[in-house]
Image (spheres, rainbow, N blue to C red):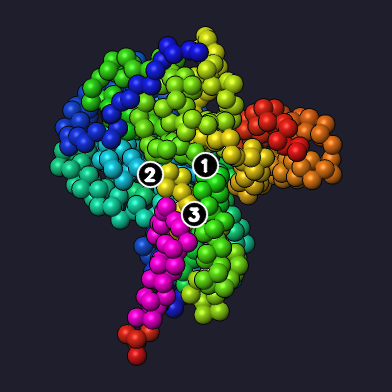
Amino acid sequence: MKPIIDLIKELADTHGRNRESLLPILQGVVEQERYLSEYSMIEIARELDIPATEVYGTATFYSFLDYRKMGKNIIRVCKTITCAMKGEMQILLAIEDMLKIKVGETTPDGLFTLLRTNCLGLCHKAPAMLVNSEVYTDLTPEKIREILTMYINKKEEELNHVN
Amino acid sequence: MSTSYLLKRADFIFKNENDWEEVLSKSISRPPHELINELISSELKGRGGAGFPTGLKWKVAAEVKSNVKYVICNADEGEPGTFKDREILSKVPFKVLTAIAICGYVIGAKEGFIYLRGEYTFLKPELLKAIKEFEYYCKEIGLDFTIKIFIGSGAYICGEETALFESMEGKRGEPRNKPPYPTISGYMSKPTVINNVETLAHTYTIFKYGSKRFYDLGVQYSRGTKLFSVSGDTPKPGIYELELGMSLADFVEEFGDDDTKAVQVGGASGFLVPRKRFAETNIGFQGKLVGISLPTGGSMMLFNSSRSMYNVLDNYLNFFAEESCGQCTPCRVGCQQLLRGIKAVKRGEKNAQYLDKLLHLAETMQITAKCGLGQSVANSFSSIVENFREEMIY
């Protein structure tokens, strides 16, 4: 994890300081931080020399650029018609049951945020979801438990590694 | 029952051909106008759903005088029920890259972009690898052309070409007024050719085999093949390449589960066709003399008799209400009012005649909305409410 200011400078060096580089920079910050804080939006505006309101206006348009604090892993369950028909509700229930959070909430340890999203383009393998940018398809409640356990174990491994 | 056009399978797009280098070098040794004529005589129409003649688009962009021009591959595949572009980019990326470069050669552009939707970010590493190899070959044969990937951030409306430009320019993805059209003033106000992924993949086929091979497939006004994304209540969901012009009845016979009640052709912004109209409906662009022709971006969602059409419509309207960019009033307010309206009728707070008012509102949106999103809400809304009125009420 880099300090946000360094990260923004680095992203601006890579993508340029034009208006066209705004979206890639926002995406780069979200990739590390998972969301855009007011502070980071102001810093991006300073770096690109544009009004902070422009940054805010652009960022809030896009559903993948969150401006509320998010968990480390963002789960996005597809809610569009085919996934809805093929058991999206059971999938949501399985996640809610396991993580003890509702849609829109973040686990107290900050590991997961649960969201619903529009069509992921995986209708032939419904129900589907994204965890960050990883794709999971043909979901069942059993599969959900396996996938989430994997992410939980990954975190524990990282903790052990640090210790 | 019309059985004049049985399903005809084809295999062009996903055919494993390792000859992109040859197709590219051969194509760019031909004069640009010859390539444009090849496209025009193939009668290829845009495969994103709108069906604009591709050859004409390239021709206009080629004729405009400008030092800087762009080619953009629209991979912001957001329409519910379509997933073909993802498959093309992951299975045959070099066909698309080759087509982008040939387009660049034809119109005189040095830069190409792939606008990849945020949901498909996982494709990026493989695509970057392919682009690297591709650009290396371009340099070898002396073609000055680069391709960059631009990732979207989860906005359906950015699939609309002018909203896509706005998004690439670092702004909110709000559609612009047309005209000017992208071929005159597109990305960064420069002449831009923007084509769907599948359209570009078809141009590869045309440049490789010649326009006649493509033209001979399909029916009048709807030439060639098309990828169909089949999902919903079907025993074999997936992606299929079929000749255009087939009857929906034949389609349902092949892909249905013997209990198909309705098919949504063209995703949430397309039309719902009830069982009684399967036989008279053909899949292709407008202009056929007999029956109804429905154009499609390739999304075919099947519903069997266990599905409530009210739930389906509710799902679509939620989708539109969320994805409306909010710029023009008919769409911003209309989508929400339609959603509230059908809920009120369902709960009995409004009588059944209220549905007629909602149909009128949908029609108003079709006339007054600024872009394709607001204009096409009426397609699914009217076709569902008119054909399944009783399901909306009880």
Image quadrant where residue B373 sits? top right
Q: Are marks 3 and 2 in contact (CB under 8 Å)?
A: no
> Which SS does the magenta portion mostly show?
helix
Which structural element holds mark 2? helix
Amino acid type shown at disc 1? Pro
Task: Check disc 1 and report its element: helix, strand or loop.
Answer: loop
Nearest to viewer (mark 3 / mark 1): 1
Q: Are marks 3 and 2 on the same chain?
A: yes
The residue positioned 78% from the left and 33% from the top of the image is B355
The residue type indicated by label 2 comes to Arg
Where is residue B19 shown, x and y percent of the image?
17, 34
Q: Is residue B317 left or right of residue A3?
A: right
Q: Nearer the viewer, residue A29 or B226?
A: B226
Residue identified by numbered label 3: B153
Q: Which residue is mark 1?
A: B80
Indicate yes or no whether the magenta region holds residue A153: yes
Q: Position of residue A32 (x, y in %)?
A: 43, 70
Label placed on residue B86:
2
The number of numbered discs placed on residues in the rendered structure image is 3
How would you rate the neighbour count of disc 3 (Cα within 10 Å): few for under 14, some for 14-19, many for 20 or more? many
* Residue at horizontal 52 percent and vertical 66 percent from the top: A95
The stretch of residues the image draws in magenta is A132-158
Amino acid carrying label 3: it is: Ser
What residue appears at the point 48 percent right and 52 percent down from the top-left corner?
A127
Q: Name the residue nearer the viewer: B386 or B143.
A: B386
Above-or-below relation of B70 to A141 = above
Q: Give the spatial CA distance, label 3 vs label 1.
A: 17 Å
Name the quadrant of the C terminus of chain B.
top right
Disc 2 packing (10 Å; few <14; some 14–19; many ≥20): many
Can residue A41 be seen? no
Q: Are marks 3 and 1 on the same chain?
A: yes
